[in-house]
Image (cartoon, helix red, strand yellow):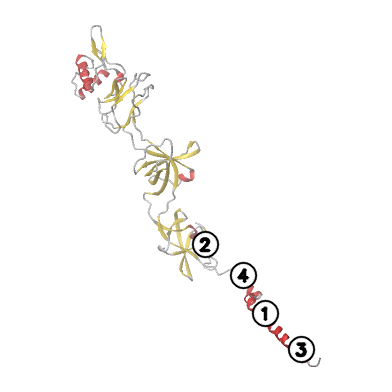
Amino acid sequence: MTERTPARRRWRRLVATAVAVLVVAVAVAVGVFLGPRLKSPEQAVADAAPPPASLVTARVERRVLAESVVLRGTVEPGASIKLEVPPGLAGPTAVVTDVRAEPGEPLREGAVLVEVAGAPVFGLVLPFPLYRDLTDGLSGPDVREVQRALVRLGYRTAVSGTFGADTQDALRRFYAARGYPVPEQAGPQTTTPMLPRTHVVRLDQPGRTISAIPIAVGAVLSEPAAVLAELDAGSATITALAGQQQVALLVPGTTADIVDDVRALTSTAVVETVATEPAQGETGAAFPVRLTFTGAELTPTPNHTVRVTIGAALDAAPVLAVPVTAVYARPDGSTFVTVVDDPERTTDVTVRTGRSAGGWVEIAPERSQLDVDARVVVGSDFRADTSDSAATPGG
């Protein structure tokens, strides 16, 4: 027992020493790991405080301010002169057998426009439509006007107001030159040339351009108001409808982009008129807006609409502008922007505001020059330390 006691004591000292070293190592490790995370109450309060306020700025710019308004519109044909069938021609047997005229050509006086049931229909410049068939011996203003027309066309006859032999002979030559026999009226002993009123369509003046021929061979002119041709059609226009808020942004002279999505066509136009009173439509009250083409005219679109994007006015010019959040209002109603001169100094500049669009507003400095690229403060938390005047964002 005595010999083993010293060895046992040494073993115990070694174990105690190892345990002590291990405890110290663990304590050091815990200190290294937790030390940075341990804070005093004062330090915890300081760390929880918000960071110092910083200024958020934007540049002053020169830009065109214009709100785009997108509408749907219909391309409509321009006004035209419609040549209706002569009185008495319409009916179930009025079948179109030939069409002589073509769109884009001038309609010459005396030229055959169409052929109906094998007979010609030609135009004469007359102050009124023919109201009766002209036959041998008739007199009146209608006879006189036909005689004047024949003379203008190179067929000599007396302008007497009486449908006599010389006028009948001129009429025979007129028909023959166009490839048709002159109509004749059977008399007691012989037949004489006549002019049926169904062969003459009245023209108000010569040389009008044929814009459209709405009939084709085989058509039956059954309606008294059937149209043979349209003359001198005006330019196509676009009619769109704008709501109450949209119409406030529209003025005549404003440019527009036109897109026909169905036919993949584009053009440009300009606002011609904006109605001041709403019109009742299928979707409620709206303000009619009329536009005229400045680019290539699109053909009328009766079965679908086109997209109308109305943008900047023709005379719009770049203006001095800042984001709307940079403009503040004082209690007296005046407005200002805060210019950042350097990181430590700001200056309030009184301004007047104008038009706004796309989050930007026009400004006009009143007492000092505000240059392009100057930095102005945007936001709402910077006023606490930079000015002693009460202000609210807006303007």
Name the kind of residue labelled 1 in the image: Val
Mark sitting earlier along the chain (1/2): 1
Mark 4 / mark 3, whichever is N-terminal: 3
Disc 4 residue type?
A: Ala
Residue placed under numbered mark 4 in the picture:
48
For the residue labelled by badge 3, is the local secondary structure a helix, a strand or a loop? helix
User: Mark number for residue 379?
Assistant: 2
Residue 51 in the image: x percent, y percent?
A: 57, 69
Query: Which is nearer the eye, 354 or 35?
Result: 35
Residue 258 higher or lower than 192, as above or below: below
Please say if 322 is above or below 202.
below
Label at residue 26: 1
Question: For residue 219, which numbered disc appears in the image?
Answer: none
Q: Nearer the viewer, mark 3 or mark 2?
A: 3
SS under mark 4: helix
* Residue located farthest toward the bottom when viewing the structure as drawn: 2
N-term-proximal mark, 1 vs 3: 3
Q: Which residue type does callout 3 highlight?
A: Arg
In 3D space, how far apart are the residues under numbered discs 4 and 1 (Cα atoms)? 31 Å
| Callout 4 touching callout 3 (CB < 8 Å) | no
Please name which of the two marks, 1 or 2, marks the residue nearer to the observer.
1
Q: Position of residue 268 (x, y in %)?
A: 37, 45
Residue depth check, mark 4 versus mark 1: number of the one nearer the observer: 1
Q: Position of residue 75 (x, y in %)?
A: 40, 38
Mark 2 against mark 4, which lies toward the viewer? 4
**Residue under pointer 3:** 8
Rendered view: 344 above or below 103: below
Crowding at mark 2 (Cα within 10 Å: few <14, some 14-19, many 20+): some
Q: Dot 1: what SS?
A: helix
Cα distance between the residues tagged 1 and 2: 52 Å
Of the image marks 2 and 4, the number of the one nearer the N terminus: 4
Cα separation between marks 3 and 2: 79 Å
